[in-house]
Amino acid sequence: MNLRRVYSVIRKEWRHITRDPTSFVLLLLSPVLVLITMGYAFSIDIEDVTVAIMDQDLTPTSREFFRHLSSTDALQFDEFPGNMDEVESILMRGDAKAVVIIPSGFEEDFTRGTGARIQVLVDGTDPNTAGHAIRHITVHSQQFTQEIIREQLMRIGLDGGFEEPIELRIRAWYNPSLRYTVSMIPALVGVVLSVPAMAASLALAREREWGTLEGLIATPIRRSELMIGKLIPYLLAGLFSVPLCIATAVYGFNVPFQGSLLLYMALAVIFLFATMSIALFLSVLVKSQQAAIMGSMMIFLFSGFFMSGLLLPFSLMGPIIKLEAFMMPTTHFVIISRGVFTKGATLGQLQGYVLALVGIGILFLALTVLVFKKKL
């Protein structure tokens, strides 16, 4: 391999990328723009769900139950309907996502132990928010019952006579608040960093359409030198987007970065190498830029969103889909990105995924060199 010829191709391709400042800036910023758009679209951390409460019992027990429910920041009680017509109106207008109805006789039934009933009406048009409200209302209702029973036992002198059969001590590592954004945004970084590969997929298709491929074929440059020379400029352009995406995740979405920035940059280079190799292979196969861009969107964005574990867990995928997913670089880098961001994972802990990316990159670069023919 002649490094001088490789450098000549790199310089030619880099001039093509940078000769239009607007296109170059868009190439650098496109991953960030996609990250911001998708980040806000998929950031579904639900907080301060508005819930209405209708207390028909108006007893100390019902008021204590309401106090217990309102003690959490996850639910916000701003509506207090007096009848079912007002309840329907509140849900119809969307002023509340759920309504808790405490019926008459609640305290009496609770004291007797005959089963006090509480009705919860939810707005099913927004299942995520409704489910959030139901979970918090259920948990606080159970805690309220346990506290009342414990207080009653203490009154009769059985202060040590009530013990839970199972004591759960739950602690979430790496994401103590269980924020959905902390998991989603690092994974999205792995997806959007494949966007520069879409530009690389145009490399040879553009040469064919513009008629400049004939001039390259006439030179003594080897196929491997041409492919490597075309790959490196797009890899460098994609690498400039990595710190911008990290900064957007940390400062824009308040996602903590626990790992090594240098390690993340190095692993991003390997990921970009793998994606650019696939993009060049696609560019060899197709004849037009339109076909190249459509094919790259299907390969990188479609597989990134639906086959990388970003939205659909691997446990729900069939064997064939799993095999296809692990052939995609995005699948491995999503795991790497989440590991470095949230866990501070090291190279040794991620080496399996790193080796997979290296293997994918080498495989598709070799296929590109073999498939490309220096003839029209």
Image (cartoon, rainbow, N blue to C red):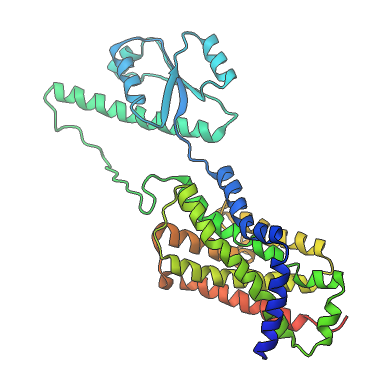
Whether residue 200 appears in this view of the structure is no
Q: Quadrant of residue 40?
A: top right
Residue appearing at x 62%, y 71% in the figure: 235
Where is residue 70? Give x, y as percent. 36, 24
Against 189, is 99 above or below? above
Screen quadrant of the C terminus? bottom right
Whether residue 225 appears in this view of the structure is yes
Residue appearing at x 59%, y 63% in the figure: 330
Q: Decide if residue 249 is on the left or right side of residue 295.
A: left
Q: In which quarter of the image is residue 139?
A: top left
Residue appearing at x 71%, y 74% in the figure: 13
Against 125, is 167 above or below? below
Q: Quadrant of residue 63?
A: top left
Where is residue 347? Give x, y as percent. 43, 72
Of residues 59 and 15, the one drawn nearer to the viewer in this rendering: 15
Against 362, is 182 above or below? above
Q: Decide if residue 139 is on the left or right side of residue 290.
A: left
Q: Decide if residue 234 is on the left or right side of residue 290.
A: left
Residue at far left of view: 157
